[in-house]
Amino acid sequence: MKFRSLLAAAVVLLVLGGVLYWSEHRKPKENASSPSQSPTILKVDPATVTGLTVKRKDAAPVTLEKSADSKWQITAPVPAAADSEAVSSMLSDLTPLTAERVVDDKATNLATYGLNDPAVELDITSKGNKISKLMLGDDTPTGNAVYAALAGDPRVFTAGSFVKTGLSKSEDDLRDKRLLPVSADSVSHIELIRKGQDVEFGRVKDGWQIEKPQPYRTDTFQVSDLLQQLTSSKWQPAAGSDPAKEFVHAEPFATVKLTGGSGTDTLEVRREKDDYYAKSSAAGGVYKADSALGTTLNRGLDDFRNKQLFDFGYSDPDKVEYHAGATNLVLTHSGSGWTEDGKKMDADSVEGLVTGLRDLAASKFVDSGYKSPDIQITVTSSSGKKVEKVGIAKSGDSGIAKRDDGPSLYSLDAVAMNNLNTAVQGVKPAAPAKK
């Protein structure tokens, strides 16, 4: 009896295995690129597109045109600069736009799919005034796709819901929201007026130079950061308020002027409690600004001055001289390393001093307190072409430094003074060569 049961089970398994084998070998091979699986609705070349019109239900059409210099502009309903990244994203979705499947090869009633009065219509104008009209209708019953059609093509497709999301752009979605929509590279002069302090910067060969209130050694990184923040700052939606009215009653906070090849653009910023409002000549209007703009502009002259005592950079100097009381170091660098009075010095210890001098920076600037220097440091670099002399007057554990080439006084805190002293004391001769 058991034998018969086992035999019957074996037969059943053989039959099931045969059916499975047959079904697997009869299944058509899937091909993601097959037209029947993922047909192409539309394929455009972004380089040839000259215009776009987005038509949405219950909203005015938004028309964009590409200028001769390949910049996008909104021409309707209101002329404005367009967000090039937003436009590029839309065009990217169309290169190509593929469907999930074809649901109707020869549609006779577009109303069935919501395509007689589409939720979104996108008109794409290419070179030669060729216009392609893409229509997006109702969502499919499952809700994860949308019906789509192309004017002149009898087919109706389904496409992922993300297609409708990506192409259904409003005027605000497509506007350039930058308060100062200019290229940072084109700016040659910056003026920042804040708390009665007027600071001006001019672009120079190696970066930026403070020109007003007087020429100062400049922290180019900080000025470049200011410019980058200004040219990327965007206005924010002002739900429930009128930015123009709020601007009138708000307290003046800062004014910025950027000058370049196309003239001067002005941004006037005012503050009302934690909110900022900006009037921009470049963007043409008054807007609510992100609070980050307030942080960007909340800087004074000293924030842009160079607090580093030395400018020799990351290359090894040719010579370092340090004189303080009984300590006198005259270190010379050559291809064979560092020496003092012809005696080879320990390279790591001297590099520690060089790094300490490179990093020596003020905590702030002061107007007085420097008399006669207790420490004198001279660094020669660039094959003798650059000589920097710094004197430091001790004041308890701290110090006040002055460069030989200007009147600025640099306050050095106790940590900076201690690090410098440690680096000097660490300099030592090289260990004797092993026999």
Image: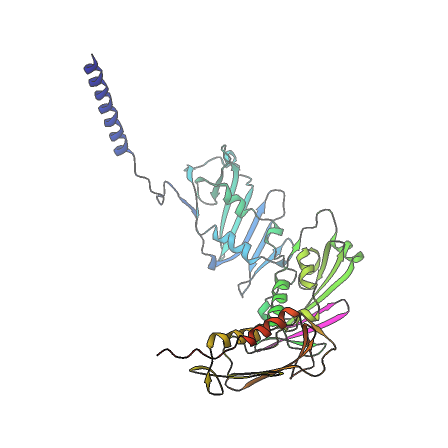
Q: Residue at x 57, y 70 (%)?
A: 185
With 311 as the anchor, is 215 left or right in this view? right
In the image, residue 226 sits, relative to residue 234, either above or below, namely below
Magenta residues: mostly which secondary structure?
strand
Residue 311, percent across and down?
A: 58, 77
As drawn, 306 above or below 154: below
Q: Quadrant of the C terminus?
A: bottom left
Which residue is situated farthest in the front direction here? 435
Location of residue 34 (image quadrant)? top left
Write the residue at 24% across / 27% down. 17
Q: Nearer the viewer, residue 44 or 239?
A: 239
Q: Position of residue 281 (x, y in %)?
A: 69, 64
| Stretch of the chain drawn in magenta | 188-205
Residue toward you, 368 or 118: 368
- 270 vs 112: above or below: below
Which image quarter: residue 299? bottom right
Quadrant location of the N terminus in the rendered image: top left
Compared across the picture, whether 229 is left or right of 271 comes to left
